[in-house]
Amino acid sequence: MAQDHDHEHCGGGTAPAQGGAHDHGHRHGAAQGHGHGDPHGDTHMDFSQMLPLLIQEAELFTPAYVQAAEWLRELRADPGLIVDAGSGPGVISGLFAKTFPAARIVAVDGAEALLTEARARAGRLGFADRFSTVEAELSGGVGDLEYPADLLWASRSLHHVGDQRAALSGFVRSLAPGGTLALLEGGLPTRFLPRDTGIGRPGLEARIDAVHDEWFTRMRTELPGSVAETEDWPALLTSVGLRHTATRTFLLDLPAPVSDEARAFVVSQLTRRREGLAEGLTAEDVATLDRLLDPDDKASVHHRPDVFVLTAMTVYVGVKPE
């Protein structure tokens, strides 16, 4: 799986994105905001095919992930082993390696192609000597570790597992006594445009969010072993034996005028929405998206000066009793 796979699974990690990537930035990504990645017609997502998008999102969302990592350092100053569960291409693994220079980092993901990229990134950034990977599906935990984790980070990867409570129990088994689990789920959908863009009916992004939420519900129900859960993340952490100790939300605010990198991200995300959600949108909204994505149209996101990137990501922290 991945993080930021949706943003939304993207996470530097793994996920598609309603605003972010399956880090797989999150699948996982996806990166992924609202932490769910945008679909391509059905509910099956191949995060290996999303590698460029996962990296794009996780790197753009780095300011918020850095804030989260620094906050976790205040809560847990000296972890010996950090596990990035649903690491995707390893962007957030690299941030943890920088934030915790004495820690060993293990990236766990179910897609070997993404782990290959994570290892290459570790080599480029100079922390390969304290970095390793484990190929494992998160439904069964995080696989075999050399020793229990002191900090386990799961960014937008859990919602790609059918039985989220069972996966959390697997995470807890891999934690050392007193170890910390940091779960990034939920938050707010990413916004790119003003409510009234001057073309089409105002409120386009809110309507896209509604269609995406229907897709996300369908995606969850079609996962193997899917179990319905109320998305009360502190309660879920408590149910698997952790002490919920903190919740904090991190804002990503890239105001207009955006950088070329941010504009390219907006184009890619709206393109995914257009391709994956068109059947649930009105003909008028699809036509508006077509104009917003037409590089020859001066009202498109390729040219308009009012494009921005704004989202919020929430992290829930639980501690394993000693």
Image (cartoon, rainbow, N blue to C red):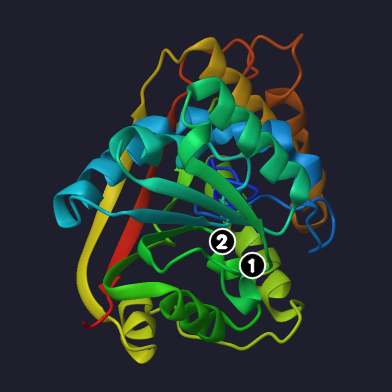
Badge 1 marks a residue whose secondary structure is helix
Q: Residue at x 39, y 88 (%)?
A: 240
Q: Residue at x 62, y 38 (%)?
A: 118
Viewport quadrant of the C terminus = bottom left
Q: Which residue is mark 1?
A: 160
- Where residue 48 appears, x then y in whole percent? 78, 45
Q: Which residue is mark 2?
A: 157
> Is residue 239 shown above or below 144?
below
Q: Nearer the viewer, residue 105 or 85?
A: 105
User: In screen coordinates, is 236 left or right of 12?
Assistant: left
- Where residue 245 appears, x then y in whole percent? 18, 72
Examine the rendering and report whether any part of residue 284 can be seen. no
User: In screen coordinates, is 267 left or right of 104?
Assistant: right
User: In screen coordinates, is 125 left or right of 80?
Assistant: right
Q: Nearer the viewer, residue 222 or 194?
A: 222
Q: Residue at x 72, y 37 (%)?
A: 51
Q: Amino acid at mark 1?
A: His
Viewport quadrant of the N terminus = bottom right
Q: Amino acid at mark 2?
A: Ser
Find the distance from the CA under tag 2 to the CA under tag 1. 6 Å
Examine the rendering and report whether any part of residue 223 can be seen. yes
Q: Residues within 10 Å of mark 1 (few under 14, many from 20)?
A: many
- Where residue 27 appears, x then y in whole percent? 62, 53
Q: Residue at x 78, y 56 (%)?
A: 45
Badge 2 marks a residue whose secondary structure is loop
- Where residue 86 appears, x then y in whole percent? 58, 57
Numbered tag placed on residue 21 in the rendering: none
2 and 1 marks in contact (CB < 8 Å): yes
> Is residue 239 shown above or below 46?
below
User: In screen coordinates, is 322 left or right of 46?
Assistant: left
Corner quadrant of residue 75 = bottom left
> Is residue 107 shown above or below 320?
above
